[in-house]
């Protein structure tokens, strides 16, 4: 293991830390003081900072845990118990001078830390035409588009089944008989109910067809995205914050492929930026939703879910955001992203 890949300068920004975590497979970084362990930073620390309104351009000192759990080299055999007792996935190892010399990860030690299960209903909006994926969707409906050898809708369902979800509702319209035929034929351990959308109702209006079928918090997802995150933590956050809706948002880093010119009021050049990088959060198309949203929605109303969110915000209802890293969100809504997702699953 190259320890240097897990070290970040105290002068770096929170955004720098997010990018470094995204680039590596280990979800922890360390701040050193002259090679001595000073602090740890996890994606959870950064998430709490974002949710508290923190600026991503602030120093990582703002988010670092300056009292991290650690072990001395002679006590490395205690790592398994320390991680299990504290439900953490990594423990730094230091020498007599408190210099960071190694890190023990629970998955490297084959330590099984029990992850909480959730059993929430999952609603998948699977009725769209998939026009952005033409010509592929002239043959197959978007939910059956293969990612690797498995249709995207089945991948989404399998993902939620693995975390404890057993009840799935597919809102179907375009090529609905083909979708039903596929899922009726496969061997499955979960329950699927099909909700026929006779006329297009948008990503929000379709859930009005679920009146009387769901009476608890549920997960709402588009049929063309995967969010690879700990949904038990997302559900815990949703309930703790008492949100009516929690939108899962992903960080996106984008490099503008041109030099950007900022112009002063007098028409002169104020500054030049060559191919600047910008970062922003975007809606993944996955939400946790309270059941009363279904009950309060007029029947057969054509509306997209983001529009419903705006309406609840205007009524001063609490709509929250759960931020995730860029690599946690996979989207196949367009030709280029569909091909990119397939490449990821080929690896």
Image (tube, rainbow, N blue to C red):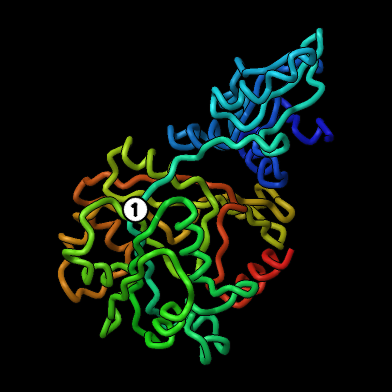
* Rendered residue at 29%/57% (across/down): 310
* Rendered residue at 63%/67% (across/down): 341
Q: Which residue is mark 1?
A: 120
Task: Determine the residue located farthest toward the right in the rendered image.
Answer: 2
Residue 219 in the image: x percent, y percent?
36, 56
Q: In this rendering, would 106 be left or right of 224?
A: right
Residue 252 in the image: x percent, y percent?
58, 54
Residue 238 in the image: x percent, y percent?
35, 42
- Of the 4 image quadrants, the one containing the C terminus is bottom right
For this rendering, which residue is in front, 313 or 82? Answer: 82
* Rendered residue at 53%/91% (across/down): 139
For this rendering, which residue is in front, 89 or 56? Answer: 89
- Of the 4 image quadrants, the one containing the N terminus is top right
Name the quadrant containing residue 254: bottom right
Q: In this rendering, would 135 be left or right of 239?
A: right
Residue 203 in the image: x percent, y percent?
34, 70
Residue 118 in the image: above or below residue 134: above
Residue 110 in the image: above or below residue 271: above
For this rendering, which residue is in front, 105 or 281? Answer: 105
Judged from the image, the secondary structure of the residue bearing numbered disc 1 is loop
Dot 1 crowding, Cα within 10 Å, few <14, some 14–19, many 20+: many
* Rendered residue at 58%/29% (across/down): 88
How many numbered circles are shown?
A: 1
């Amino acid at each position: 293991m190259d320890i240097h890949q897990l070290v970040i300068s105290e002068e770096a920004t929170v955004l720098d830390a997010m990018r470094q975590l995204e680039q590596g497979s280990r979800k922890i970084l360390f701040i050193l003081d002259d090679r001595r362990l000073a602090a740890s930073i996890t994606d959870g620390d950064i998430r709490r900072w974002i949710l508290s309104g923190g600026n991503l351009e602030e120093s990582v000192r703002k988010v670092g845990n300056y009292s991290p759990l650690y072990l001395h080299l002679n006590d490395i055999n205690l790592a398994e118990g320390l991680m299990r007792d504290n439900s953490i996935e990594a423990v730094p190892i230091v020498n007599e001078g408190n210099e960071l010399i190694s890190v023990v990860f629970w998955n490297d030690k084959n330590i099984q830390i029990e992850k909480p299960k959730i059993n929430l209903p999952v609603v998948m909006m699977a009725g769209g035409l998939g026009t952005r994926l033409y010509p592929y969707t002239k043959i197959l409906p978007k939910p059956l588009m293969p990612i690797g050898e498995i249709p995207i809708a089945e991948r989404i369902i399998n993902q939620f089944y693995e975390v404890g979800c057993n009840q799935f509702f597919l809102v179907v319209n375009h090529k609905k008989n083909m979708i039903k035929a596929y899922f009726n034929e496969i061997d499955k351990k979960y329950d699927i109910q099909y909700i026929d959308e006779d006329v297009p109702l948008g990503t929000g209006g379709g859930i009005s067809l679920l009146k009387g079928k769901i009476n608890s918090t549920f997960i709402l997802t588009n049929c063309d995205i995967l969010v690879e995150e700990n949904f038990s933590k997302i559900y815990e956050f949703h309930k703790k914050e008492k949100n009516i809706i929690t939108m899962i948002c992903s960080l996106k880093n984008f490099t503008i492929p041109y030099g950007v010119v900022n112009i002063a009021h007098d028409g002169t050049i104020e500054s030049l930026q060559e191919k600047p990088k910008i970062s922003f959060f975007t809606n993944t198309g996955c939400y946790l939703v309270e059941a009363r949203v279904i009950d309060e929605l007029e029947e057969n109303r054509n509306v997209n879910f983001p529009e419903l969110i705006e309406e609840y915000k205007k009524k001063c209802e609490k709509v929250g955001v759960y931020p995730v890293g860029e690599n946690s969100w996979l989207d196949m809504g367009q030709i280029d992203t569909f091909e990119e997702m397939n490449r990821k699953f080929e690896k």
